[in-house]
Amino acid sequence: MQADVMVLGAGMVGVSIAAHLQKRGKQVVLVDRRHPGEEASYGNGGMVQREAVFPHPFPREFSELRRIAKNRSVDVHFHWDALPGLAKPLYGYWRNSAADRYPTIARDWATLIETCLDEHKKLSAEAGSTDLLRPVGYLRAYESREALDLDLVKADMARDFGVNSTAIDPAKLAEMEPHLRTGFVGAIHWTDPYSCSSPHALTLSYTALFERLGGKFVLGDAATLARNGAGWRVRTNDHQTIEAGDAVVALGISSARLTQKFGYNPPLFGKRGYHLHFKPKGNAGLTRPVASNGFLLAPMARGIRLTTGAEFARPFAEPTPVQIKRAEPIARKLFPLDDAVEPEPWMGIRPCTPDMLPILGPAPGQKGLWLAFGHAHQGFTLGPTTGRLMAEMMTGDAPFVDPAPFRAERF
């Protein structure tokens, strides 16, 4: 099978790249070991997070580090045996979160985030799936006045990046989400984000657009990627060979294992996350996602999705959804959850870099090999943005966002 480009990885990022390249006249084959949208793109909180102009920094305060070190929190959990292997990337993450580095990183990151709503809106309109994106924002509710005041300061800072938010008192919070329990001191309504009732369905709609444009999806093993003269080849599950002049690695956390074969070994590390759906009791419901106590409750097609923060573990370690177990009893006090929909929590892995920025652009020293991974918590948010940026770079168009901060050579 011949193509101009093969895109390896059919999550939100890979699907968006494939669609944008196909729109620009390239013949594209999208390759994954699983069907589109079944990895990390499936399990997120279902938000296009326009407000997320500040990437998640490594904690710097001693009190926060001491809290995390106890390893009993909802938002962060770690396997002790994973820490030696994570020492180098986490040290880089800690250094880049310092006051002399973080502001520059945040400004570069924001150039991507600022485009996310427009790019999802355009792609979903072409895909016929705008009904999956609701412009209702999300709420972050607080039990501590001190925590609320700290985040109100951050909200003021975010306005410099065009982010909109509103402080909500307890009465207004109860009016907006009447099935939440009372007792919160207040909330912040981040008004810009889209809420998606099914991240998987949205990814599939972009895949369907790609296929309507003439692209082809095949099941295959990205690990078989090899040079083919000046181009590339990969094997499919039905023992065919795909040949293309260009290849894009958009495999999320698995990307570095493949690029190592071609001389590029970025310090990619994973933050594991879990979710579990619950039926709401009676006529209870949420209008929009609500974050509190280190977890998120999001209204989804399958029920109320409870999502967790970050877990650090060794590659291929068995799932340990202790954060779900810690969060569930708290969540039940905040909202009337009924039985779980699935027997076990779902787990996915967010691909992260020590400087909190994705790797986007050509691979060093490998003509025709392109890289698009490392979006951390925002792969779902930034898929269409990344798709457009990568397609513009690969077809020689002027990039609509400066790609220099995301170049692979920085590692």
Image (tube, rainbow, N blue to C red):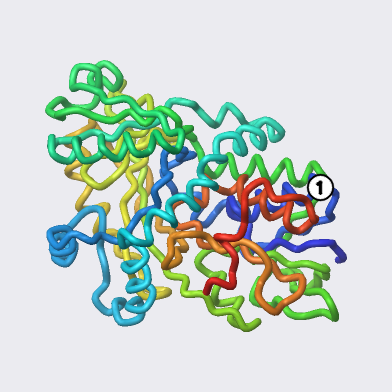
Residue 18, compared with residue 266, is above or below; it is above
Pick the residue in front: 137 or 328: 137
Looking at the picture, how far across and down is residue 57, in whole percent? 33, 57
Q: Quarter of the image holding residue 151?
A: top left
x 52%, y 74%: residue: 411
Tell me: 192 left or right of 365: left
Residue that lies at the very extreme toward the front in this rendered image: 100
- The residue to which callout 1 is attached is 24
Residue 142, compared with residue 108, is above or below; it is above
Tell me: 200 left or right of 341: right
Tell me: 45 left or right of 145: right
SS for dot 1: loop
Q: Quarter of the image holding residue 334?
A: top left
x 23%, y 61%: residue: 60
The total number of labels drawn is 1
Q: Quarter of the image holding residue 363?
A: bottom right
x 35%, y 81%: residue: 85
Pick the residue in front: 349 or 191: 191
**Within-10-Å neighbours for mark 1: few <14, some 14–19, many 20+:** few
Tell me which amino acid carries mark 1: Arg
Looking at the picture, how far across and down is residue 365, in whole percent? 69, 79
Looking at the picture, how far across and down is residue 367, in whole percent? 76, 74
Looking at the picture, how far across and down is residue 188, in whole percent? 28, 30
Q: Quadrant of the N terminus?
A: bottom right
